[in-house]
Image (cartoon, rainbow, N blue to C red):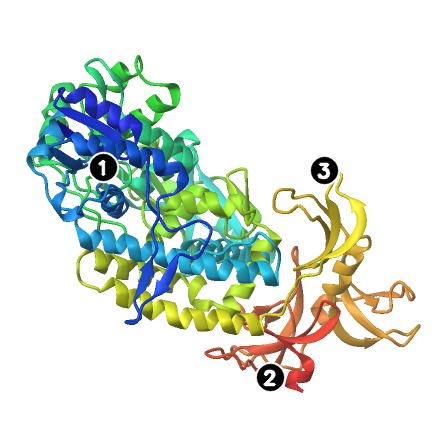
Amino acid sequence: MNLIIVESPAKAKTIKNFLGKDYEVIASKGHIRDLPKSRFGISVDEDNHLVPAYSVAKENAATVKEINALAKKSDTIYIATDEDREGEAIGWHIAHAIKRDPETLPRIVFHEITKTAINNALQNARKIDMDMVNAQQARRILDRVVGYKLSPLLSSKIQKGLSAGRVQSSTLKLVVDREREIKAFIPEEYWSIDTLFKKDIEATLILHKQEKLSKLSITNKKQADVIVESVKADSFVISKIETKERKSATPPPFMTSTLQQTASSKLGFTPKKTMMVAQALYEGVKTPSGTSGVITYMRTDSLNLAHEALSAVRGVIESRFGKKYLPDEPKVYTKKAKGAQEAHEAIRPTMLQFTPEVAASFLKPDEIKLYRLIYERFMACQMNDAVFEQQSIIFSGKENEYRASGRKLIFDGFYALTGAEDKDKLLPSLKEGEGAEIQKIKQEQHFTEPPARYSEAALIKKLESEGIGRPSTYAPTIATLSNRTYVTIEKKQIIPTEMAFTVTEILEKNFANIVNVSFTANMEEKLDEVAEGQNDWQKLLSDFYFPFLEQVEEGKEKIISLKVAKPLGRACPKCGEELLLRSGRFGEFIACSGFPKCKYTEQVEGDKEDKEQSSSESTHEICDKCGKEMVLKSGRNGQFLACSGYPECKNTKSINIEEKTSETPCPECGGKISLKNSRRGPFWGCENYPKCKFISKFEPTTIKCKEKGCDGALARRTYRGKEVYECIKCKTRTPIEDIE
């Protein structure tokens, strides 16, 4: 008898169906040996090597016993775990768990679970790749070091139940940085001149008095009025008509990240759901010829396609659509994600005869949706491009010039399968030299919008482009941030919580490398080098481990505890545990002592008033009623001055924001800066805008920031009731007394 060991029971069942009675197939159900859950589990030997203390968890003991019993009866034991680093390491751990030498066990790999693929794999067995195993060991140990050393530090300094992670924390910083951009965003006014020429031709103004215009060129109503009057007084002729052919290129086949992104936008699936459904399609579903895997391995960053699959799909395209839809040669896609190293294929169907129409009778509703997406993308990537006729008309006047654009589909190419997303926009037949009349002109005010929050799909795209994590980590990383209450997901938007800001700020100040995107991506590249046999995994670990331990010890001394846990003698209305007064990023709040199991919170009475005070800006003006300083505040009707002695003194005074000018020159160009207003509140802006784009919420001084590598100007402000200096670039806050 021969034994094949795979990871999942579903996969085991599918493979068993393909093989005769000479083979037994069993599942390890994932990792059966790992670092211990209850302790750190890593020691340092005399050579400064990090030594992991792997063990079999209690819940896996029965599985190991069962595998061991079958192994003793078997002539050959095949390791058939997934073909990536994780799968390679699981196979290595299985060998150790059943007390076999990993070097002696044949290793078989396959991209798809079909009878042909399994038989080919059995005929081409290899040995376990120790470079891949060591790359996984290095990743596991790095993640354990960061998680076990940093999480307790955050819990002791901020709040119980917090966690940090090597990939998790740099991902969280991306989300927090985007939210900071949104909060700091100041809308810019711009105007559009929407124009229709006769015969309903929409046109865009591209030139006014020989000056090229872009979307944001017209910045106020006065400019817009002048241009509209000029256009109305102008006379236009059709000076140029251009017709060009443009191709719409076929999309590449799916890899993990693009499948998750497309399933999110077209099907509304979360990345986690996409991977669960894809896993089922890969491991085996019912088909007309029995249970089989109907897609290739779904954790991949490769765009490679098997030669046999290309030959098969070209035959289907020609028979279904005709020769003109088939390129002369198969299309090859070589662009990969940053740092892609895994030797997989792209995600494609394994049986082209199992069309979405046939599959509809066998698959569950979500499975058929995702399968259709994968099937049609694979077909489309090997069809001819779509061809459009692009039309362009220039309307020229004495002072103004317009362009109108249109297009017409002249060959549908792969759109014959997927359908065209863009409809034809046809222009009427006109001749050069003909006169043209304005049918309608309208000017409209707009304001620039802040950057959008990340959706799960957009964040995965960002992680991929930055080289953070790998296909198997994208969905779990986002799930971890959500489970740890660092982010909430509302209407597909990822929104960081207040705790996310607190944790990120502390990590930025004390563990800059952990949240640094480049550092995290560089570590991924080093792990890739280990997998390729080009880097020593133990050197990689020790180079990180010892400096990191010093950072942790320094953090224990330097980081000021934000913990306040004063019992209030009241029970939580949600779970009955005692309520505590705690300290957070924006002051005190009431929370349940049962956190993180119970997440009940309350605002402290008067908290809103405190927030108003903390967000007030010093003005150095004196209250004429009590002699205390007046501060700048925001109200329903705009900016006003209010006495800092509130509520004892309730004196207020109106202010003309535009008239407040700073004595300090602009730190960017030396020009004058003045206090301006926007829908998001007051800000200091330079008179040389738009050439100089300096903006700040607080008035800068001539004092320079002393943080390493930063030359930003310091601004004086009130923060949590105290006067501080804050750098307008790196946002570091320093007590007034430390500077003066």
| Residue type at the position of mark 3 | Lys
In the rendered image, the quadrant that contains the C terminus is bottom right
Marks 3/1: CA–CA distance: 55 Å
Q: What residue does disc 2 label?
A: 702
Q: Position of residue 164 (x, y in %)?
A: 49, 56
Residue 450 shows up from this direction: yes
Q: Say which mark, if any, is on residue 250.
A: 1
Q: Considering the numbered disc 1 on the image, is that residue within a helix, a strand or a loop?
A: loop
Report crowding for label 2: few under 14, some 14 to 19, many 20 or more residues within 10 A (C-alpha): few
Q: Residue at x 64, y 47 (%)?
A: 595
Residues at marks 2 and 1, CA–CA distance in whole angstroms:
56 Å
Viewer-nearest residue: 336 or 423: 336
Indicate the position of residue 355 as horizontal and vertical percent values.
Answer: 23, 19
Among numbered discs 3 and 1, the one appearing first in the sequence: 1
**Residue kind at label 2, given as amino acid type:** Thr
Say which label, 2 or 1, has the lower sequence index. Answer: 1
Q: Residue at x 27, y 37 (%)?
A: 254
Residue 233 drawn above or below residue 29 = below
Q: Nearer the viewer, residue 335 or 163?
A: 163
Kindly report which numbered mark, 3 or 2, lies closer to the viewer in this rendering. Answer: 3
Secondary structure of the residue carrying numbered label 2: strand
Task: Tell me, for residue 574, which label it has, or none.
Answer: 3
| Residue 612 against residue 293 in the figure, above or below | below
Marked residue nearer the N-terminal end (3 or 2)? 3
Name the foreground residue: 436 vs 529. 529
Q: Is residue 467 visible?
A: no
Q: Which amino acid, mark 1?
A: Thr
